[in-house]
Amino acid sequence: MHDTLIPAGLDAVFDVPMVTRVEGEGSLRLRVRNGVVEEARLAIFEAPRYFEKLVVGRTPDEVIDIVARICGICPIAYQMSAVHAFEDLFGVEIDPEVRRLRRLLYCGEWIESHALHVYLLHLPDFLGYPSAVELARDHRPAVEQALLLKRTGNRLVKLLGGRPIHPISVRVGGFSRVPRRSELEALRPELEAAVAQARATLDLVTTLPVPEYEREPRLVSLRHPTEYPFNDGRIVSNDGIDLRPSDWREAFHEEHHEGSNALHARTADGGVYLLGPAARVALAGEQLHSLAAEALRATGLVAHIRRNPYWSIAARAIELIGATAEALDIVDGYRPPAAPAVPWTPRPGVAAWATEAPRGLLFHRYEVDERGRIAAAQIVPPTSQNQGAIEADLVSFAPHVLDLPHDQATIRLEQLIRSYDPCISCATHFLDLSIERR
Amino acid sequence: MIERVSPVRRAREAGSSIRPRLGVVKFASCDGCQLTLLDLEDEFLALTERFEIVEFAEATTNRSDGPYDVLLVEGSISTPEQAEEIVRLRRQTPLLVTIGACATAGGIQALRNWGDETDFRAAVYAHPEYIESLAFATPISDHVAVDAELRGCPIDPGQLVELLTSLIVGRRPQLPDESVCLECKRRNAVCVAVAGGFACLGPVTRTGCGALCPAYGRGCYGCFGPREQANARGLARHLQVVEGRAPADVGRLFAGFTAYSEPFRSMVTELGGVAAPGVAPGGGPARESHDA
């Protein structure tokens, strides 16, 4: 490790062979020449798993089980994009209560995933700890609060889906089983506590020392007229994109770059764009749950969240408030549907849909044949869409840290990467930090 | 060679201040099984007081190449680098525990073993030449000796706690090898195969999940893999002859997250489901079985 002070203007290489506290395996390499960043590359060395090919020949319900395995942290996102794609193609009208239960399931995943990221993966960066384990020695109540919040998210998923990781109940047409009212009511006290814990989380993160850095990224998310986006809405951007959730390919495409087991997504004009909590808060903030909207206004951080990637931690805290509060509303209003699922018949054609994973928009597209089997698949995870924007941010941010000691500069850069909550297992179809100062 | 001394004995001999060094590493996988450690929630902090976590890239920036007292390994071996790395890691630990269906059975990505790997690369990536991948995705035990395994896709948190506790007190972990059916009966669930008409792998699958799928109104799909002496062929025949299912439909049922474990592997080869019936892993005819 180097701890020499390298003044701006010199050449340097920053290398992080494996970025930690992210999901999956990747590395960063940044090369600086005469104080100018020549190259920033997040390389994904997570081994390829070929999901798009594994689902060929399978039935829609089998696909729902298989695609969950792309990611242990956000399996529901994968199940949701798939199930809505199929239901859209097959013309299945799901029961409104089933639709609400799907939102509740997504709330559970967002709570679990955001609590994990805010406290266990991201917070140690701001407070200078290698992990939540050391953090817990000095700040035990904060870590305990995190684990409680995370547990509540997991319990929601477990109740609706059987288990927190790779749940089993999502089926085309609805669920294989829906909960009894009493089962959901039993979670009420915990959810009430979770709303308070989520508010305390926002209070905590707004006191953090956040590095100063601003840029105006192109943002993309789903937007729905009346709901904060989970399963439904139009794909919108801050520069005029406005598409059905099935029409992602009209504005975006994927490219394959050397040195990466992930495909990178770009806009039609080859530009990079950013997905995730900051994009959603910026583009769909009007639909935030009233408790979350109020909390956001009180922080005065709206513009900061949009411009400074490090403030994504506040966006996640806002969404934690929204997800816990909405979960409580859904639980209170729940009337079990007449049947867990409605019957359906497959029809050939293209099934495509996008939903909002905790890390951002997740697009699926399946070609379905005459027998109702998958003929071809395309899965575009949030991280492979964000990778270009992350690399662009590294290039523009790096000059701010070049006069720091090499170790500290590297930590800042890694922290920047973690602020996007990259999910590399998903994107493998992501991430290697080396900064090269020549 | 590393001396085989139990972490417990080492700790006892050195006084209770020394905690066993725990490593968590991954190969090709979804990270879900290692996430189960963090999902222990209440027990996670207690766990960090009993074990010194020296390697767990998903959770901590502190890294260690070894040695470890216990190493939990997630994921299957899918690239040439991984095949080398697992051999290096084996030399760093007296206790290597595989966690989850990818590590113990190859996982869902092992379905590609029935096809031609280059086809898979070409189907997913525009530049297949950028991708380095082995012809087969294989379980850890195909490469190095494994001391204990936790099955499941994902692993069960209860079984994980049982394993770690047994390591601390120095006894064998109690991991049941019953079928899902027994668990289902204990749970008083109505049989989804008999009463619901669902295709169910419960009779041949090891429990560990708590018979979740039947309790949630669907058939078991084999996450914990075959139990010992599972009569997969008998079940396959029943599903075809008695329940009238097409061979490929039965083959696809076995072609799940533990498909590469015998006897599920033979059922997939015989019945098809991921490739034509009779095609063995490697893409050849069934008789020439592949040696991993």
Image (cartoon, rainbow, N blue to C red):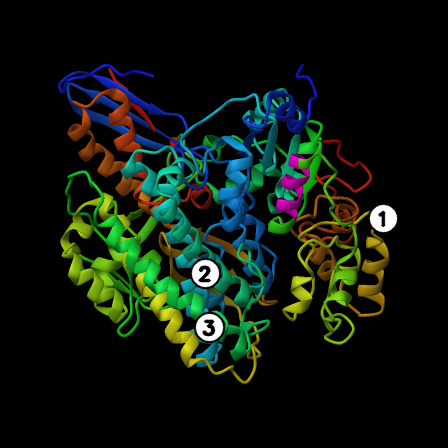
**Which segment did they paint magenta?**
B159-168
Secondary structure of the residue carrying tag 2 is helix
In this view, the residue in front, B270 or A71, is A71
Quarter placement of the N terminus of chain A: top left
For discs 2 and 3, the disc positioned in front in the rendered view:
2
Residues at discs 2 and 3 both on one chain: yes
In this view, the residue in front, B136 or A407, is A407
Q: Is residue B15 left or right of residue A134?
A: right
- The label on residue A101 is 3
Secondary structure of the residue carrying tag 3 is helix
- Letter of the chain that mark 2 sits on in the rendering: A
Where is residue B224 shown, x and y percent of the image?
A: 69, 51
Where is residue B119 shown, x and y percent of the image?
A: 57, 41
Q: Residues within 10 Å of mark 2 (few under 14, many from 20)?
A: many
For discs 1 and 2, the disc positioned in front in the rendered view:
2
Image point (42%, 44%), residue name: A427
Image point (34%, 68%), residue name: A325
According to the image, label 1 marks what residue? B229
Q: Is residue A287 left or right of residue B198?
A: left
Is residue B27 in sight in this rendering?
no
Query: Compared with residue A369, is residue A308 higher up or lower down, i.e. above or below?
Result: above
User: Magenta part mainly helix, strand or loop?
Assistant: helix
- The label on residue A152 is 2
